[in-house]
Image: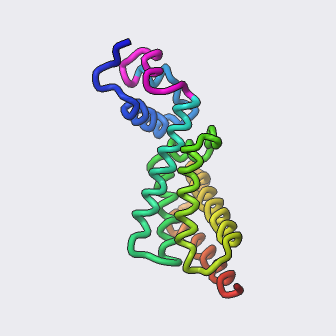
Amino acid sequence: MAQRQGLDAENVLQAAVEMADTQGVEGLTLAALAAKLNVKTPSLYNHIKGLPDLRTQLSRRGLMLIKAAMVDAVIGKAKDDALLAVGFAYVDFARKHPGLYEAISILPDYEDPELKEAGNDVVFFLLRILEPYGLSEEDALHVVRGFRSMVHGFASLEHRNGFRMGLERDESLRRLLQTYLRGLRTTESAT
């Protein structure tokens, strides 16, 4: 079967990213994606294995991009400044890419080796940022889990219009992150 000129797996994934960011992951269907690409739905199977595979690819892409955003944010920073920058980069990614962020949050097939590796890369990156705090491996993993829970909660509430007061959201995020960092410094001094 001849493939459409210029259509490849990357084009398909990029179109899916755009659709997910505007319509949400649940709004992404193969029929809608084919229509966006101006092809028949069966043509997509030349590039993807189906909708579950596409959602896994979205999750992988999202994890790679959120890690890249966090890496860029911490250049030249350490300790509290680095974690503050990572927190803002995380929430900013969720703001700019709500569909990809949703794909990260639902992780359709965490047994997929590439998806697992992409998720582990994010965790290892955060662990590296925490090294100057001198935490044990277990304590550092708990800090990563707590940090992610905190920024994910903020991003999720914001996405669902959970912050309706006239307060500046970034100021709320800054204060939340600073409070968490004060607790982290207390943990650090206790070890």
Residue 181, located in which quarter of the rendered image?
A: bottom right
Q: Residue at x 36, y 28 (%)?
A: 8
Q: Position of residue 13 (x, y in %)?
A: 43, 34
Residue lying furthest left: 5
Query: Residue 151 versus residue 41: which sits nearer the camera?
Result: 41
Task: Relative to 125, say whether 26 is above or below.
Answer: above
Using the rendered image of the protein, determine whether residue 50 is visible from the camera's viewpoint. yes
Q: Position of residue 44 (x, y in %)?
A: 44, 21
Q: Position of residue 179 (x, y in %)?
A: 62, 76
Task: Relative to 189, say whether 93 is above or below.
Answer: above
Residue lying furthest bottom: 189
Q: Residue at x 50, y 65 (%)?
A: 86
Residue lying furthest front: 113
Q: Is residue 177 left or right of residue 96?
A: right
Query: Residue 61 versus residue 111: which sits nearer the camera?
Result: 111
Query: Residue 157 versus residue 45: which sits nearer the camera?
Result: 45
Query: Residue 132 versus residue 173: which sits nearer the camera?
Result: 132
- Quadrant position of the N terminus in the picture: top left
Q: Which residues are magenta?
A: 36-51
- Quadrant position of the C terminus in the picture: bottom right
Q: Is residue 17 left or right of residue 122?
A: left
In magenta segment, residue 117: no
Q: Residue at x 46, y 37 (%)?
A: 22
Residue lying furthest top: 1
